[in-house]
Image (cartoon, rainbow, N blue to C red):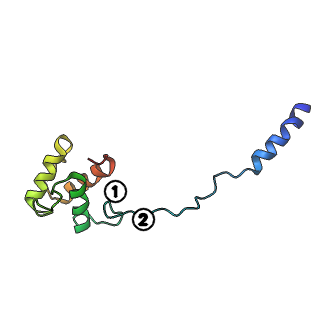
Amino acid sequence: MRRYLALLPLALLAACSPASPPPDQNPPKPQSAESSSAPGNATLGSIQWYAWVDQRLHVSDDDGHGPDRGSAEWNHAVQRKLGQEAPQSPPGSPQWQQAVDSLLRTRPAM
């Protein structure tokens, strides 16, 4: 019985402690356009999505020289950049875009 009485203050202390840490007082920083994470609301095949893929894989150079985003040439350049991981779907197809998006979201930036 004495053993249980000795543990009672510890049990009360544990029961009164918060279950989770207090929320962070600093609001999250907004992501810049240069961020390597995909825009959360970008639709596959949209201008924003193509820009994100281009940035992640460096299809175009820093001066913007390269194939037009979304063109057959650009799609094949993405395939080459992905190498062994490249989707087997026809380049540019909705299935291909979904596979590229999934791959780039889980892959570290180049």
Report x, y in % for residue 25.
59, 61
x 73%, y 50%: residue: 17
Comparing labels 1 and 2, the label whose residue is closer to the camera = 2
Q: Is residue 38 left or right of residue 7?
A: left
Residue type, label 1? Ser
Decide which of tag 1 and tag 2 comes sooner along the chain.
2
Q: Nearer the viewer, residue 60 or 85?
A: 60
Q: Residues within 10 Å of mark 2 (few under 14, many from 20)?
A: few
Q: Picture coordinates of residue 101 (x, y %)? A: 27, 55
Give the Cα separation between the discs numbered 1 and 2.
12 Å
> Residue 106: x percent and y percent?
33, 48
Q: Secondary structure at mark 2?
A: loop
Query: Relative to the observer, which residue lies in front, 26 or 20?
Result: 26
In which quadrant of the rendered view does residue 26 lie?
Answer: bottom right
Residue 38: x %, y % from top left: 32, 59
Residue 66 versus residue 15 in the image, above or below? below
Kind of residue sitting beneath label 2? Pro
Within 10 Å of the Cα at label 1, are there few (<14), some (14-19), or many (20+) other Cα atoms? some
Say which mark, if any, is on residue 37: 1
Which numbered tag is attached to residue 62? none
| Residue 24 relative to residue 64: left or right | right
Q: Residue at x 31, y 46 (%)?
A: 108
What number is the disc on residue 30? 2
Q: Residue furthest left?
A: 73
* Residue 10 in view: yes
Q: Residue at x 75, y 45 (%)?
A: 14
